[in-house]
């Protein structure tokens, strides 16, 4: 009977519990997003309110503020947007999930963080080249055993190569054969992302209120 009488829409707070720790930005419960990925060493949770992604646990608001400051300074930050089209499409294969990453920001999460220090996001700018590269790599990740191997081979970012030699050889070949088709699709995804403010890499400028 309980199942039948339960209200279908519940406030997000009702989901709080040991498996759903509070979001270090907005306090709403974090929900499971991705199972543990070997290269990340932990499962990934996401906040359905501000969109923040958290790999593993969070030590709280001070830690996430420090992580944001590392992406720029007091007046700016360049984020890899967890609310981007490429992230929605890529899931666990999203190129923004590099080894070592802890927090995955969205513009909304940053807006709330800087509001705590009396700042507003005055400008957001889609960074075309960097966005395109990550979306291109996200598409290639969907067919390779390893993760982010093409960009790393081009000297950008950090890869998690496949374990077996034969897998790495296939990855190399697939990246070459599919480089151009993936580039064409990636350009379309990013142009749409720019249009709908869901681009992958975004520069943000902050100003005092
Ligand atoms: Zn949140």
Image: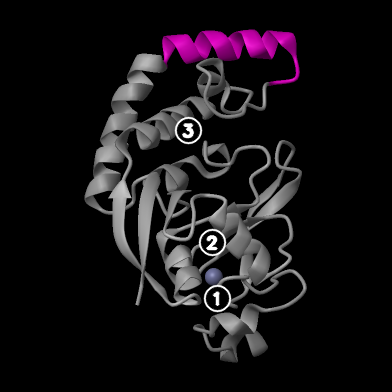
What residue is shown with label 3?
Answer: 138
Q: Disc 2 on helix, strand or loop? A: loop
Residue at x 29%, y 24% (from the top left corner): 184
Residue 71 horizontal side relative to residue 85, left or right: right
The label on residue 52 is: 2
Can residue 98 be spotted in the picture?
yes
The majority secondary structure of the magenta stretch comes to helix
Q: Give the residues in magenta.
A: 162-178
Residue at x 28%, y 31% (from the top left corner): 187
Mark 2 Cβ inside 8 Å of ligand 1: yes
Task: Examine the structure image and report whether residue 176 is included in the region drawn in magenta.
Answer: yes
Mark 1 Cβ inside 8 Å of ligand 1: yes
Q: Position of residue 20 (x, y in %)?
A: 69, 71
Report, in whole angstroms, how far the alpha carbon at label 1 lies from the one at label 2.
9 Å
Report, in whole angstroms, how far the alpha carbon at label 3 lies from the one at label 1.
28 Å
What residue is shown with label 1?
Answer: 26
Mark 3 Cβ inside 8 Å of ligand 1: no
């Amino acid at each position: 009977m309980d199942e039948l009488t339960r209200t279908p829409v519940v406030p997000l707070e009702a989901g709080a519990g040991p498996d759903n720790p509070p979001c270090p930005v907005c306090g709403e419960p974090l929900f499971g997003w991705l199972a543990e990925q070997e290269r990340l060493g932990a499962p990934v949770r996401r906040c359905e309110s501000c969109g923040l992604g958290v790999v593993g646990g969070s030590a709280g608001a001070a830690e996430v503020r420090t992580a944001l400051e590392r992406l720029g300074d007091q007046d700016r930050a360049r984020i890899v947007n967890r609310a981007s089209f490429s992230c929605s499409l890529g899931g666990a294969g999203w190129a923004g999930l590099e080894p070592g990453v802890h927090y995955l920001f969205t513009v909304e999460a940053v807006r709330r963080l800087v509001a705590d220090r009396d700042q507003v996001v005055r400008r957001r700018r889609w960074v075309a080249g960097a966005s395109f590269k990550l979306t291109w790599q996200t598409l290639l990740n969907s067919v390779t055993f390893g993760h982010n191997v093409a960009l790393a081979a081009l000297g950008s970012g950090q890869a998690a190569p496949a374990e077996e030699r034969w897998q790495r050889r296939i990855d190399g070949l697939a990246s070459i054969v599919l480089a151009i088709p993936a580039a064409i699709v990636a350009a379309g995804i990013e142009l749409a992302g720019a249009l709908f403010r869901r681009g992958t890499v975004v520069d943000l400028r902050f100003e005092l209120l």
